[in-house]
Image (cartoon, rainbow, N blue to C red):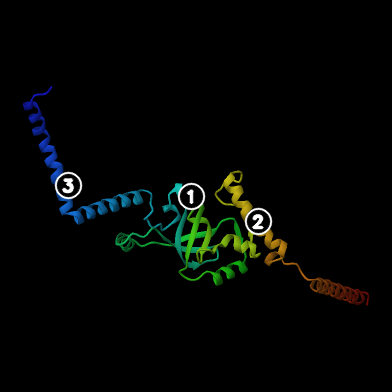
Amino acid sequence: MPSGSDTADVNEDDKPSKNVIARISQFADDNLTLVRNISTCLGIAGFLIIARSIRLITKFGSATDIPARFIERNISIRGRLRNITENGLEVEHLPIYVPLLSRLLTKRQFVPLLDVRLAGVEMTSEGHAWIAQQLKPAETLWLRLIARQNQSLHCLVSVNRGSLFNTCVNEEVLRLGLARTSPLVGLDPHSRASWSLYKRLMRAERKAEKKGKGLWKEESRWERVSEVWRNNMMLVSLKKLFKRTSRTKEK
């Protein structure tokens, strides 16, 4: 059994450590607000380091700024529509917003616009007109990254107008017969991702074809009869002209 002196020595050894813990606990109790603020700052700092490392708060100004892994994983990024061009859309990228820091980053740099194309879609003039009517200036868009071609991004472009209404512009122009499906740029045609996306776009195009919309609109019976009649009239006129020419030559 330990003697009384040994027990006293053990208690004496424990006192300094207990005093340190007690002092820290007392300091934390007395400065609870400060401790919370320090914890919050450390948490924010950690989030910013992680976000910066995976480019969540980086504002992309061109297709080459976007990491390859974003495109390989078909990540969706947010943007604001600025212009509608003959080839597609010009979009300002909107990264995750962090108070104060986002403002500082925005003020520091001039950001050009992303050149966005509708993936797997060949637009018609009617399709461009429809997009100009439907998409509002400065409207927020979601861009699902499909491929990169030089300075252009091929994306599935979606518009979120309410929690229950999310429209994919690529599918919508096909569904209305305002565009045709086209080969998917930058994707292996034999890959599972390419085949899945192509089937999705083809389903939208088939709906327009079945309903006779846009490009797939069939002429009515009267229009076909009128066309035949016009062709016949042209044929009759040509025959008359040929006969007159022959008679003139004979004379």
Whole-number angstrom distance, CA of label 2 to CA of label 1: 24 Å
Q: Are marks 1 and 3 in contact (CB under 8 Å)?
A: no
Q: Which amino acid does label 3 sit on?
A: Ser
**Which residue is farthest left?**
5
Horizontal and vertical percent for residue 67?
43, 49
Marks 2/1 in contact by CB < 8 Å: the verdict is no
Report whether 212 appears left or right of 96: right
In the structure shown, which secondary structural element does the residue marked by tag 2 occupy? helix
Q: Quadrant of residue 243?
A: bottom right
Q: Where's the C terminus, which quadrant?
A: bottom right
Mark 2, Cα crowd under 10 Å, few <14 / some 14-19 / many 20+, is some
* Amino acid on which disc 2 is placed: Arg
- Judge by depth and name the residue closer to the eye, 235 or 148: 148
What residue does disc 1 label? Answer: 71
Q: Residue, x 15% and y 46% (percent of image)? A: 24
Residue at 56% from the left image edge and 56% from the top image edge: 119
According to the image, label 2 marks what residue? Answer: 203
Return the disc, 2 or 1, that comes first in the chain's sequence. 1
Which of discs 2 and 3 lies nearer the camera? The answer is 3
Whether residue 17 sits left or right of residue 203 in the image: it is left
Residue 3 locus on image (x, y percent): 8, 24
Callout 1 amino acid: Ile
Name the mark on residue 25. Answer: 3
Gap between marks 1 and 3, in whole Å?
50 Å
Which is more N-terminal, label 3 or label 1?
A: 3
